[in-house]
Image (cartoon, rainbow, N blue to C red):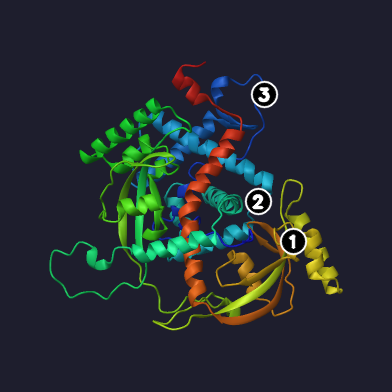
Amino acid sequence: MSGLRHPVAALSLTLLLGGSVLAPLAQAAGKTAPAVAAPPAEQFVDGIAAIVDKQVITLGQLADKQAQVRRQMQQQRIPVPEDAVFKRQVLQQMINGALQDQEADRLGIRVSDAQVDRAIQSVAQRNRLTVDQLKKEILAEGMSWDQYRSELRSQMRDDMLRQRSVEDRISISDSDIDAFLQTQGAHPMPSPSQQQAPAQAEPPAAAPTGPELVELAQILIEVPDYAANSVVDEKRQQAEAILRKLKSGADFAGLAASSSNGPQALQGGDMGIRPLKDWPDLFARAVADVPAGGVTGVLQSGRGFHILKVLRRGYAQRPARAAQPAAAPTPAARAPQQAASGPMMVTQTHARHILIKTSKVVNDDKARSTLESLRQRIMHGESFAELAKRYSQDASAPQGGDLGWLNPGETVPAFEQAMNALQIGQVSEPVQSPFGWHLIQVEDRRTKNMEQEFRRMQARRELMERRIGPAYEDWLDQLRSQAYIDNRLEHTRSGVQ
């Protein structure tokens, strides 16, 4: 699959869910201030919390971030760990944020003011507020409007980075899909009748038509790669000790904040909400029969030991008709709809594209200018396919940029929106996506019965959803292993001066 195809992981769900208007910032809690120049030689060593390659994180920046995260945790009623633990957790998130910032800079990934404005409008709409009302809520929660925009921009940039850097690491073969479909047929997910019955008999509710949704939190005790058996046993005992505390009534979110090595530790371990079948197999099996509020035992994975808590579970009613976008949709913009039985007719688009990726050398302006020049050449009669072979930086270049027949929802939103607006034979203006800048040409459109293909496409998406989390963690580990990281708090903790 081409790199521009839409990643399945809900990396931007915080922009779409309700709740606190600060929800979009939950995953951005570890972001640092922009990179600063290395301090002069006379600066005191104890003024530096960490150095990540050429970026310095100062104790002042760490204190500011601690104050911000502390406010967010208090608003979410998550117990704040003791100061030394809290400071280490926040600094680790800031280090991870700095690594991602540097990688985004290397790849030339940027978020424009217009993109931030649209995201803010989306957040306001999801919370049933105007932008002015949203701004008042943000100020009331102790954050300046400029800081909110900056944090939101950072989260959007991270999402674009993950889409571009992590999705290409995941390979799903036809045999993987065949095995998944056979497994789903042999082991169906629990039906509503298997859930705990209510205390009082009531008339049965209408059967849910959507997937079962489960919100999970985790405590992760990480085990280093190639750890000795004694280290693995030590980590297991640590996880089992935490589980005993939980069984004795300890607060899960508080223990996650103080003990977990997971990236969501300071959010109480909350990993978000998604369909049960989209969680990794290990998690889905472990929580299949766990009620809301329940906790699993200790689970072992390649990363270490996990303890999961089911925060919420329930069914989402799938609407009878797919929601329509604000703009009048073209025929290709219609999402697939399926009757209770019978064929599933969808409109497919046959498209080509030319991709210019951004980097430190090729910024947005240069990429867009290059594509504008190529578009003029196409308008004057040159072949789109031949120019794609020569200039496109996508894997489809040898095929003249040919992406084949695309289904609705199969590419990233920016690409699909621009493609859907084109008539057959038209060439788009330069279009920006998380992968760079594109020219798009629509070759043809057709309507096809996609009943069998849709099942396979759904299976591919579910497999991608399950694999993208571990792939992201592996990618972040690789960034850490390649970077120079000097964590001064760890030096202090171990007694190194």
Residue holding disc 3: 40
- Tally of marks: 3
Amino acid type at circle 3 is Pro
Q: Which residue is mark 2?
A: 109
Image vertical order of residue 330 relative to residue 163, above or below: below
Q: Mark 1 belongs to which amino acid?
A: Ala
Residue occupied by mark 1: 397
Q: Residue at x 68, y 47 (%)?
A: 107
Q: Nearer the viewer, residue 343 or 366?
A: 343
- Which residue occupies 39% across, 53% down? 281
Local SS, label 1:
helix
Q: Residues within 10 Å of mark 3 (few under 14, many from 20)?
A: few
Where is residue 224 drawn, in percent x and y? 46, 32
Residues at circles 1 and 2 in contact by the CB criterion of under 8 Å = no
Image mark for residue 340: none
Is disc 1 in contact with disc 3, using a CB cutoff of under 8 Å?
Answer: no
Front tag of 2 and 3: 2
x then y, percent, for residue 179: 45, 61
Q: CA distance from mark 1 to mark 3?
A: 48 Å
Of 128 and 432, which appears nearest the observer?
432
Of the image marks 2 and 3, the number of the one nearer the N terminus: 3
In this view of the protein, which residue sits in the foreground, 494 or 132? 494
Q: Quadrant of residue 405?
A: bottom right
Determine the residue positioned at 68% across, 79% down.
444
Instruction: Say which element carries label 3.
Output: loop
User: Where 425 falls versus 294 (above or below)?
Assistant: below
First reached walking from the N terminus: tag 1 or tag 2 = 2
Q: Position of residue 436 (x, y in %)?
A: 68, 57
Q: Where the N terminus falls, by quadrant?
A: bottom right
Which one is closest to the eye, mark 1 or mark 2? 1
Give x and y (percent) for residue 488: 52, 24
